[in-house]
Amino acid sequence: MKDKRSIKSYVFTIIITMIISVAGTILVMQSNFNFVSKDEKAAIITNTIVEEKLSQIDQWSTSEFKYNGVYSKTKQREFFGQRVPLADNNVEIEYEGVIKVGYVTGDIKTEVNNVTNTITVKMSSPEVFDNYIILDNLKIKEENNILNPLHVSDLPTYFGSIKSDELARAEQEYNIYAEAEKKAKEVISEKLSVFKDYKVSFE
């Protein structure tokens, strides 16, 4: 009878030992799994991956300003520094145009911090992508004087003045550069929202 109890006690001890051993093994495996998962998470989100995500953005021209107006110019003819009477040439240009402001991919830099789970986006100042006059919509009126005729070569100078004036107006009235920066941040934030555990900040 005593031997039977001893056998039962021995078997019970073995079973308890096995249960403790298996439980310990499971806890170690779970601990290792969690540790590896954190490391893998830190390795997954890198600057390369973030910048690759941003490279998928098709349109970096984030702000557009459409303009129109009338440009008038009086071209005077001078002789030895003196204005020649009745030799003025007047031109009036009715125009429409478009200004596009934004960023190029190289202007956007990122920095990933896997400790604080933060993606810092560094942006330079936006730049003018395009500023053009729609030639098909041009209307030119002139009072051409045979003594001081209008030359086609004068038009680029007039167009340059128009584009310069309209860019200044776009900055003053529409705040085009600030608008471009604001919209770029919105586009970037939306694109990086896939990294749900990370906060996006801008510098």
Image (cartoon, helix red, strand yellow):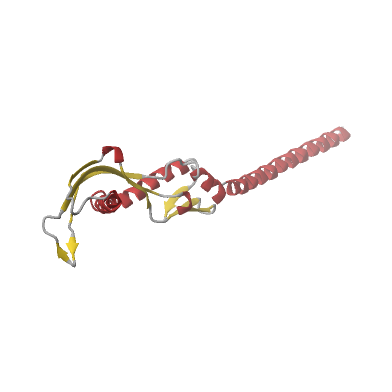
Q: Judge by depth and name the residue closer to the eye, 150 or 29.
A: 150
Q: Residue at the spot x=60%, y=48% of the render?
A: 43
Quadrant of the rendering where the C terminus is positioned: bottom left
Q: Position of residue 136 (x, y in %)?
A: 29, 37
Q: Judge by depth and name the residue closer to the eye, 133 or 169.
A: 133
Q: Position of residue 81 (x, y in %)?
A: 18, 67
Quadrant of the rendering where the N terminus is positioned: top right
Q: Judge by depth and name the residue closer to the eye, 82 or 137.
A: 82
Query: Is 77 situated above or below 98?
Result: below
Query: Is 80 situated above or below 122?
Result: below
Q: Residue at the spot x=71%, y=43% of the render?
A: 24
Q: Residue furthest right?
A: 3
Q: Is residue 203 left or right of residue 23?
A: left
Query: Is 111 situated above or below 3?
Result: below
Q: Residue at the spot x=45%, y=53% of the render?
A: 107
Q: Is residue 152 left or right of residue 22?
A: left
Q: How many marks?
A: 0
Image quarter for residue 84? bottom left
Q: Residue furthest front?
A: 146
Q: Position of residue 188 (x, y in %)?
A: 43, 45
The answer to whether residue 172 shows anywhere in this view is: yes
Q: Position of residue 80 (x, y in %)?
A: 19, 67
